[in-house]
């Protein structure tokens, strides 16, 4: 795959790994990095041999939010463009047919945490810290943090996280239902690959539909329409060769 300045992309079998690579800046996101992230996400989403995507950070952070020096020096026009590109970044993860996993090892703050929230799952090392500290700058999260967080946990905890702007450890966020798995610091990389590789062995066709149906369950689409969509989808899948072969293989194994 293409070489980037602020990122790395690696491939492990069917798993693509997008790695933020500004470790001296705790992977803080500037305009150049945002452009490269969007391009890299589009590249991974279009890569037929990739069935699962993982995002990680180089060094001590997943991503410590926006690059404040650049962020604070933007003109009004640059700020608006930055926000609009950010929306595209988050949506390109959320709307991808592939599952995306945020593998947080270290700090995931502000926009970094918002990228993790846009992923389908979050796994984290024990040492990780996550939060939305924008209130300390007299701002609010601008990358969907106020909306995506409420889709994952109750409103009282959302308000606590937003109002106080505190950092929360991985085990707390696991107990709150934000983090899917907490892996040990020493074996984090191996456990992430193992987790993603296991997912990559599931039917990519099924996973794509499961992601779509799970996401629309949070939408304003009428419940009856969503249920009908689910019924039509399982009917379509049942009639395809992939499902028929899997069903017959299961029957043969169960008869042994």
Image (tube, rainbow, N blue to C red):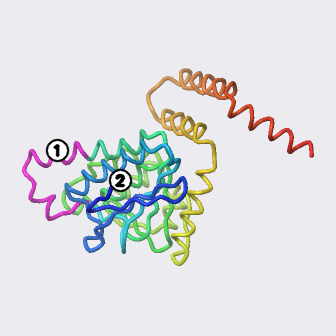
| Quadrant housing the N terminus | bottom left
Q: Is residue 82 above or below residue 213?
A: below
**Residue 152 in the image, given as x and y percentages of width and height:** 48, 48
| Residue tagged 2 | 114
Question: Is 250 positioned to the left or the right of 168 in the image?
Answer: right
Task: Between residue 153 and residue 181, name the one nearer to us.
Answer: 181
| Residue tagged 1 | 81
Residue at 34 percent of width and 65 percent of height: 166
Frontmost of labels 2 and 1 is 1
Q: Residues within 10 Å of mark 2 (few under 14, many from 20)?
A: many
Residue most extreme to the bottom: 186
Q: Looking at the rendering, which quadrant does residue 246 occupy? A: top right
Residue 180 lies in the magenta stretch: no
**Disc 1, SS:** helix
Structural distance between the alpha carbons of marks 2 and 1: 18 Å
Residue at 49 percent of width and 43 percent of height: 48
Q: Earlier in the sequence, mark 2 or mark 1?
A: 1
The magenta segment is 66-85
Q: Looking at the rendering, which quadrant does residue 248 occupy? A: top right
Check residue 187 in the rendering and tell me which mark sits there, or answer none. none
Query: What secondary structure is the stretch in magenta mostly built from?
Result: helix
**Residue 28 in the image, given as x and y percentages of width and height:** 26, 64
Residue most extreme to the left: 75
Q: Residues within 10 Å of mark 1 (few under 14, many from 20)?
A: some
Residue at 58 percent of width and 42 percent of height: 204
**Residue 88 in the image, given as x and y percentages of width and height:** 30, 42
């Amino acid at each position: 795959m293409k070489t980037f300045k602020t990122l790395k992309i690696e491939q492990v079998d069917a798993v693509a790994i997008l790695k933020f690579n500004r470790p001296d800046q705790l992977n803080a996101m500037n305009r150049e990095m945002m452009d490269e992230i969007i391009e890299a996400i589009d590249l991974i989403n279009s890569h037929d041999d990739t069935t699962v995507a993982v995002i990680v950070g180089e060094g001590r952070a997943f991503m410590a939010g926006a690059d404040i020096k650049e962020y604070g020096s933007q003109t009004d026009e640059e700020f608006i463009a930055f926000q609009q590109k950010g929306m595209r970044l988050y949506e390109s993860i959320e709307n991808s047919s592939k599952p995306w996993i945020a593998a947080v090892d270290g700090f995931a703050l502000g926009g970094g945490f918002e990228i993790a929230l846009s992923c389908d799952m979050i796994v984290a090392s024990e040492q990780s810290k996550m939060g939305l500290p924008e209130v300390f700058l007299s701002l609010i999260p601008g990358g969907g943090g106020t909306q995506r967080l409420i889709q994952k946990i109750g409103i009282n905890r959302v308000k606590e996280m937003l109002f106080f702007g505190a950092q929360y450890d991985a085990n707390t966020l696991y107990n709150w239902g934000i983090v899917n798995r907490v892996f040990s610091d020493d074996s984090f990389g191996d456990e992430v690959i193992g987790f993603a590789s296991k997912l990559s062995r599931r039917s990519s066709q099924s996973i794509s539909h499961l992601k779509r149906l799970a996401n629309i369950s949070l939408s304003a689409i009428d419940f009856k329409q969503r249920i009908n969509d689910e019924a039509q989808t399982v009917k379509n899948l049942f009639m395809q060769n992939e499902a028929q072969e899997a069903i017959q293989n299961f029957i043969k194994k169960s008869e042994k």
